[in-house]
Structure formats: structure tokens, C-alpha cells
Image (cartoon, rainbow, N blue to C red):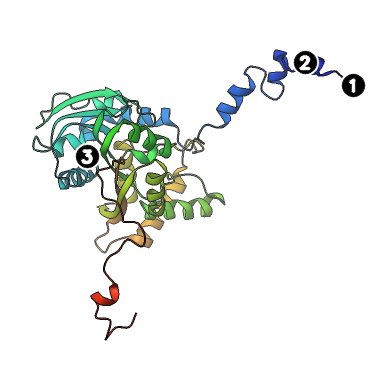
Amino acid sequence: MNRSLTEVARLCSRPWLTRAYTSGKETAREYLEKTAAPFEVFDRNAKRMQRNRAAARVMDSREVDYLKDEVAARVSDRLLDIKRRYHTVVEIGAGCGHLAKAVDDDMMDRLIMCDMAKTALERDNDAEYDVQVERRIVDEETPVFEPESLDAVVSSLSMHWVNDLPGMLIQIRKALVPDGVFIGAMFGGDSLFELRTSLQLADIERDGGIAARVSPLTDTRDVGSLLNRAGLTLSTIDVDSIVVNYPSMLHLVSDINAMGEGNAVVQRLPFIKRDTLLAASAIYKELYGNKDGSVPATFQVIYMIGWKPDPSQPKPLARGSGQVSLGEMFNADSHKL
């Protein structure tokens, strides 16, 4: 059936046509914006509850601070290597204040601790630190600060639960002043490979398949691309491994839960069967056990440093601008180039 252009324009302006390929409760623009959102790997609400629940058991929570305290101390060393003294430093994903224990007033005047888990953030409210501390409830996945208002941003062992890492880093870059620095630490892809392998083998043996028992983690090779995509320059990346020995796999799992680092993958199973867990523990000890009966757990930590671009930063010279010949430098007579 032929229609005039006027009739077609009138039909296209009708509201029901904008909902033709949606659920009927949203416009086409809202549908496109929703589908363009980052794919959710982690259940952020579940992670918030895990952290709060773990921090509510104060004594148990403090007993397992050893890993996060150690990594926070190493992050603090990297901040100290930058020969600057900052007025205010913002920490994204501060948790129970692990970085606050490691810094002193020679490095900064004030530390703003941001975390989405209120109970964890306020667990050590009565603690005294060398620097002034301010606590804020902020979701590290969507940090919101005034543009170009921060001199330095730090994140220690929190980014591995973020769904949209590029988006988070872009927001941090926007909040930094020119020549401001971001220092981060996150678990790498080889973390807990012993536990991952043992659970997978136990699942195959008992249930005939593999379940999402351990969180997926970022590969070291991808971190540089993430920093570049966010617009951070002069990036520095290094990797460290921390090996902790436990009496058994069950003790390791207990400590992970007490840290608030339990599985928060969206497609996780709600439970693990007892025989599967015991089988995994036996496999773990057989494959990786130490001579003294303990079992090792490897935590790979990726450290990263990125800077917001500024004209004062060093830049490579243009191609062809060199004034000295390499042949002359290495004695052209004896080394023909």
C-alpha cells in the first residue's frame, strides 16, 4: 500500500512505534542505553554484603588482615617513591583502612577512604593513624569527584571486583589534576591457581562438569591497555607473587571468606557439595602439598602506575631529530652499521 511522505512522518511520530522492539515499558533510546551498559560479571550487591558481613565479625576480620596489609604497605612504598608530598590522597576501595596503617605524615596531610561497604569502612573507627582520615561511602565502580580536583588516587586490592574497569579508570583520570598520579594494585590471573585447579578437577570427578567457583581475574598483559584506554600515560606495571602456607585448603577458604573475598560471580552456584569440597581438598594436598603437610596459596598482585597527561611531562623526540650518529658513538670504523 502506497503512503504519502506526510502519512509516513505522522505514523513515525506516534509513541507506540518507538517501543516496537522493546519490552513495552521503555523507549528505544532507553533500551539502547541499557544494552550498551558494561557486561556484569560480578554481583556488586553480593560483594557489598560479603564485605559488611565479614567486617561485622571484628576479631575474625582483623586476624585475616595480613594479606591486604602487606599489599597496602607495598602500594605505600610506590607512593613514597614519587618525590612529592600530597595534601590529599583519595583511596578507592579502602576496606578496613589497610593503606591508612602504612602511610605517614611525610607523604600526605589527609587520606580520604572510599568504599561501598559501610561496616567494613567503619570497622576501625577508633583507630589512630599518622595522617588525618576521612571516610566516605562511595562505590569504587562509579567514583564521582569534581573534575581536576585530586592530586593522587590509590586503589589497593579492590579493582578485581569491578565490572567496568575502563569506565572506573576514565573517571579517575578526569578527577586528577594534570600530572596527577594513579597507583593501583589488584589480584592477577594466576592468583589461587592451586585452588582453581583443585576445584575444577573435583567438579569434573564428582559432577561431570566445571562450575564458576573462583572469580575470573585480569591478565597482566591487559593492564597496560586498560591504562592507555583510560587516557593515562607514562604507565608502569610490575607483578609480584605472595605465597601463603595454610594447614589445609579448608583453612584457606575460611580465610578468604573472612576477608570478604568470597565468590561474587553473577553465575555462581549457591553452594558446593560436601563430597566435592573434601575431594578438592584431597586433590589440593596431593598436587601442591608441602612436605610439612601444609598447602601453599599463591596470590599474584599486579601493581600499576599511570599519570594524567600534562605538557610538563617528558616526551619522546620526533623521529629524525637526533644530532649524533650511532655509528660515531660506537666507532664507525670498527663497527659498520
Instruction: Name the spot of residue 316 as percent of width and height, x first.
Output: 31, 55
The residue tagged 1 is 2
Q: Looking at this view, is 71 or 198 the one in front? A: 71
Q: Quadrant of residue 35?
A: top right
Q: Quadrant of residue 140?
A: top left
Q: Is residue 262 above or below residue 277?
A: above
Instruction: Name the spot of residue 334 as percent of width and height, x first.
Output: 27, 86
Q: Secondary structure at mark 2?
A: helix
Q: Secondary structure at mark 3?
A: loop
Q: Secondary structure at mark 1?
A: loop
The residue tagged 3 is 65
In contact (CB < 8 Å): disc 1 and disc 2: no
Q: Nearer the viewer, mark 2 or mark 3?
A: 2
How dense is the environment of label 3, judged by Cα within 10 Å: few (below 14), some, or many (20 and up)? some
Q: CA distance from mark 1 to mark 3?
A: 74 Å
In contact (CB < 8 Å): disc 1 and disc 3: no
Marker disc for residue 11:
2
Instruction: Name the spot of residue 321 as percent of width and height, x first.
Output: 32, 61
